[in-house]
Image (cartoon, rainbow, N blue to C red):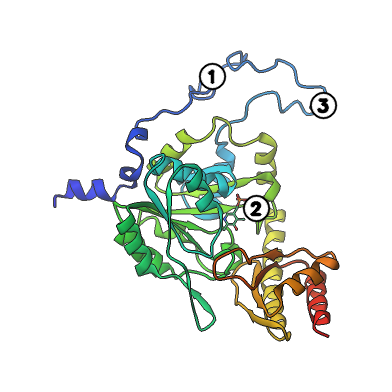
Amino acid sequence: MSAAIDIATANPLALVREDLRDFGGYRSARSDRLQGDVWLNANESPWPNLSDREGTLRRYPDPQPQALREALSALYGCAPAQLLAGRGSDEGIDLLVRAVCRPGGDAIVVTTPTFGMYAVSARLHGTRVADVPLREVDGEWRCDFAGVGAAALAQGARLVFLCSPGNPTGALLPSGDISALAQALEGRALVVVDEAYIEFADAPSAVRLIASQPNIVVLRTLSKAHALAAARIGSVIADAGLIEVLRRCQAPYPLPSACTDEALRSLGRDAALQTRTRIATVRSEREALAAALAAIPGVKRAYASRANFVLARFDETQAAFDRLLAAGVVVRDMRALPGLDDALRISIGTPEQNATVLAILRGARA
Ligand SMILES: *Cc1c(COP(=O)(O)O)cnc(C)c1O
């Protein structure tokens, strides 16, 4: 094999839908990067709305504000050109499916129990979903990496969705296995690592693996550890060429300026410091909650978690759920997911809220 062919197969752009490789996307009023003082090219109002006291909302926002891209790429440890900001990681998932899988064709691989949006995006696109379920070994969730690789090849999957730490399992995936899988699937599929909860894991991000395995794509979000779910700011981090393609598939103005401003404020020094403290609190609360849950009669198992929730199995799941709900505490019923027909997922709250959960569950068995 010649070096030229090697480079071509290693280039993740080769995995983009052939009909989209030279797709320019929508040419917005912002596409031409013109300079001027009087802007009459986008049919915007020349006056702000009376309600818009600051007068900042009458113009379409920058599609990818440089300041946001720089702040996020500094936070995640990549180059700005390797990062696409969008409306939550949910949009990143959808963009990846649409840019890589042919409509009504191709396949993705997921590892259930996992986040539901991978399969939802695939289904909306008419793309098949192959499942290689996680395995439970001695009370720990394990990903069958060999099985995932084999299924991806056998099914002609263009995308593999891994979640680390996993939702709802809380389990972290070994980065060596992620790299090896990506290497095995080079030229065949992108390996997407959804790190919505990595801040709680005290573990390095898969972002650093992209340099040696350019078919790795990482999803990050401000929704969880950064407490900004309503701002809808998620990032796709990948090979710069791939990011270009995803940008062209994205909506013309995906980031409302108010959300960009909030995101930038949240990454400022004081807010970022407080975020770090809160993450530490969540971690210690999580360890305490998992240990205390495991000691409650009627709790069959509380899984070790690297995220901001604990997954637990109950003898009488409905009774536990009802008891919590009657006291006004809403947890996530996981019983519809394969293999979790007795499980609830409990997000880590404030120390007071976590104590309440424990008190209710202890009372339920009294
Ligand atoms: C919450 C969650 C997301 C969604 O993130 P947004 O950035 O809010 O869209 C993505 N992936 C997983 C695994 C999640 O649990």
Front disc: 1 or 3: 3
Q: In this rendering, is residue 317 above or below 97?
A: below
Q: Which amino acid does label 2 sit on?
A: Ser
In this rendering, the count of numbered labels is 3
The quadrant of the image that shows the C terminus is bottom right
Which percent across, then down, holds residue 131? Answer: 44, 61
Is the residue at mark 1 in contact range of ligand 1, meaning its CB lies under 8 Å from it?
no
Q: In which quarter of the image is residue 336?
A: bottom right
Secondary structure, mark 1, is loop
Which residue in the structure is indicated by mark 1? 35
Which residue in the structure is indicated by mark 2? 223
How many angstroms separate mark 1 from mark 3 (CA)?
29 Å
Front residue of 312 and 218:
312
Report crowding for label 1: few under 14, some 14 to 19, many 20 or more residues within 10 A (C-alpha).
Answer: few
Which percent across, then down, holds residue 16? Answer: 36, 42
Which percent across, then down, holds residue 7? Answer: 24, 48
Q: In this rendering, is residue 329 above or below 235?
A: below
Q: In this view, does 268 lie to the left or right of 75?
A: right
Please give the name of the residue rendered at 59% of the width and 70% of the height, measured from the top-left corner.
340
Front disc: 1 or 2: 2
Please give the name of the residue rendered at 45% of the width and 28% of the height, measured from the top-left corner.
25
Front residue of 100 and 241:
100
Q: In which quarter of the image is residue 326?
A: bottom right
Front residue of 104 and 110:
104
How many angstroms separate mark 3 from mark 2 (CA)?
28 Å
Q: Which of marks 1 and 3 is nearer the N terminus?
A: 1
Which residue in the structure is indicated by mark 3? 51
